[in-house]
Image: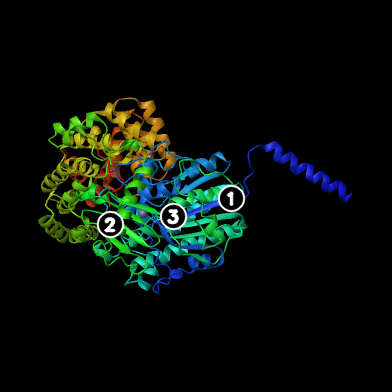
Amino acid sequence: MNRGLSLFAVIGIATMIVGCGAREPELNVLLVTLDTTRADHIGYAGHEDAHTPRLDAFARDRAVRFENAISSIPLTLPSHTTIMTGTYPVHHGVHDNDGFVVDDGVTTLAEILGGAGYSTGAVIASFPLDTQFNLDQGFDDYNDDYRQDWTDAEIDGRTVLSFGFIERKSNQVSAAALRWLEEHGDEPFFLWAHYFDPHQAYAPPSPYDSLFASEPYDGEIAFMDEGFGVLLDALDAKGLLDTTIIVVVGDHGESLDQHGEPTHAAYIYDTTVRVPLLIAAPGSGQATGESVKRQVRTIDIAPTILDLLGLPAHPDMQGSSLVPELHDPESGPERVALIETHFSHYHYQWAPLRGLRTDRWKYVLAPKRELYDLANDPGEVHNLIDVRPEIAADLDQQLDEQFRNHSWPDLARSVETITDTSVLAKLEALGYATGGGETVRTTPFPSREQLAEMPNPRDQSLVLRFINSSREMLRQGQFTKALEVAQKGLAIDSDNPRLFVMAARAEFSMGNVEKAIELFNRAAEFDPTDVHPFIYLGSAYSQLDRNQEAKEHYLIAARMSPGRVDVLENLGGVQASLGEYTDAVETFEKAIELEPGKWSLHMRLAAALRQTERFDEARAALQEALRLNPYSPVLLDQIAKLYATIGNYAFARQALEQAINIDPDEPLLRLHLAAVILGGGDDEGEARAQLEQVVTLAPDTRAGKLALTWLDGGDVELLEDETVVPTTGASPP
Ligand SMILES: [Zn+2]
């Protein structure tokens, strides 16, 4: 009987293996990326101010820790692209957050694992990884709905001129990840959770705000640690901890004023390129609790995960599996790391930087070259370039060879900001220099001779500080100071486009819109490849009701960054204001294609359709908006307008009464209700009562004045088409 059973079981298993063909995945994969997290600011790394009990316990009890894991670039989108593809930026083509889109031709870990039968999901915490930048390749679900679990205060606090990236906090990331696990935890899965909290501004929630009052950056890491713990507990509760490979890695660090750099992106010191890396591979026989001191790279992560799953690495991948180190921390090949940043070049017009790091040395190719002996000078304080010229010469040659060998042959691999000649023509027509029609944001690294002529980022740390403190003051609403600081920066570095943007934003925020326009124009002249001045110019002109000019600048921005939904939404709004409703319809439809789940787009589309008398389509669009957001008074107002336009005043009245229930203090709703009551021939006294309330609520607004005019016997159009639509969007760093 027993023998019969086991034979049956054996046959059953054999049939299963033969029958399914593709390998049946046994292990899941959880990739956790810790944005802006320094390797040395976690408890297990010996940082005294750290409060990271979950990461510390994870490192001790479940993982192997890598003490010298090197990121390829200190910027979010390019670094994550490296992690996902196992290739350097010179191969995958993404060199900055701005102006680059991940090429469809790269192969991502998600594509490979999806092909191997895994359910693939990602929860993204901030705008640089937004779906429009195309790193969602291979993910069945790519949750970049940052507002998903926002509090009302967070929603209310965000405007188009908000400073800093749009983001969600780690507890909200974990909540979304848990929801995904609820649905997919029973299937073989690959889940990526991205935590963004440590990125500036440093504002940890309670109790970390007071516990870390003097070290808010560490407070953000402490809060993130809690979010990571929630995710681990959920895996534990589902019994998945022992069947899930967990990789925790930073995308880049944060300088915290070391080397004269406030944050990250401009330099390539270890403060920003050495990142935390923990790998837990259950059942692999790894040396849990031990640490690897030898250098590894973020290009090694994807090949490692594939190796642990028994899958081959993709031939494009430039890293190699860390499984040898996982088993024996002393083993493994020498892994030379390439590092780069073009950020200062793109945004400040200084030199770009390249670096080569070995276990012992860091060599930086800059207008003035640098060499550090990491074994004896881990803080990279003593430049040995003149002391050890033979080492420098050797590393310099290696750097050239390695960058050449790792580069994708076509420099235009990634979509640069400007490739569209019609945009260039338009820029020229508006008076912007366009560098002779070349695409500027490609990345040939300058020759040694060219490099020597460029401003050395290292010498510009004072300007970096001015830029950073101006940005912080803007964020805190200290506009006069922000302007002063930006001007101090400009006194030293007079053609720095970013400083013009800072000064312009300060002027804009103080209501000096004309002055702001002048400064945004200067920024655009110095760097016509940067989309942000054009977005701001659109916004500034539209504030002045100069809608034609607003439209022109939004059009440029939309052509430069075709994936930016916020730009399209604003463009459509301006087109509608100009009465160009057919164009507006087209623009909103384009935006909806990019982000079908955004209710305000459907609502604005409906408004434009109504104006072109396409009432059935308008109704369908409003229905979709209502499905996405049943509780918006603004939307109910639009619904009322459509019904009023087609003469159904009773329905219009219902919609407005519902809207007023939700927001009794909005004068426009009451103004419109009065109009609808009058239009439907209902009791004039009721309309009068509503208008009196409008006057009480907002005597000085346009609505208040219209109401007063009517009450005084004037003949005015009460159902005007002005709606307050919340604009949303992302701002540059
Ligand atoms: Zn980042």
Please name whichever residue, 231 or 405, is drawn nearer the observer in this view of the structure.
405
Does the beta carbon at disc 2 come under 8 Å from ligand 1?
A: no
Outermost front residue:
390
> Which numbered tag is attached to residue 267?
2
Mark 3 vs mark 2, foreground winner is 3
Scheme of image coloration: rainbow
For disc 3, the neighbor class at 10 Å (few under 14, some 14 to 19, many from 20) is some
Image quadrant, ligand 1: bottom left
Mark 3 vs mark 1, foreground winner is 3
Please name whichever residue, 636 or 276, is drawn nearer the observer in this view of the structure.
276
Image position of 411 with respect to 483: above or below: above
- Disc 3 to disc 1, C-alpha distance: 35 Å
Q: Residue 381's image quarter?
A: bottom left
**Disc nearer the start of the sequence (3/1):** 1
Image position of 88 with respect to 477: above or below: above
Image position of 156 with respect to 551: above or below: below
- Disc 3 to disc 2, C-alpha distance: 22 Å
Q: Amino acid at mark 1?
A: Gly
Q: Circle 3 — which element?
A: loop
Question: Which residue is denoted by mark 3 in the rendering?
Answer: 335
Q: Amino acid at mark 2?
A: Tyr
Please name whichever residue, 90 or 348, is drawn nearer the observer in this view of the structure.
90
Question: Which residue is denoted by mark 1 in the rendering?
Answer: 185
- Disc 2 to disc 1, C-alpha distance: 40 Å
Q: Would residue 255 be seen by someone viewing this image from the given angle?
A: yes
Q: Circles 3 and 1: CB distance less than 8 Å?
A: no
- Residue 165: x and y in percent read 32, 52
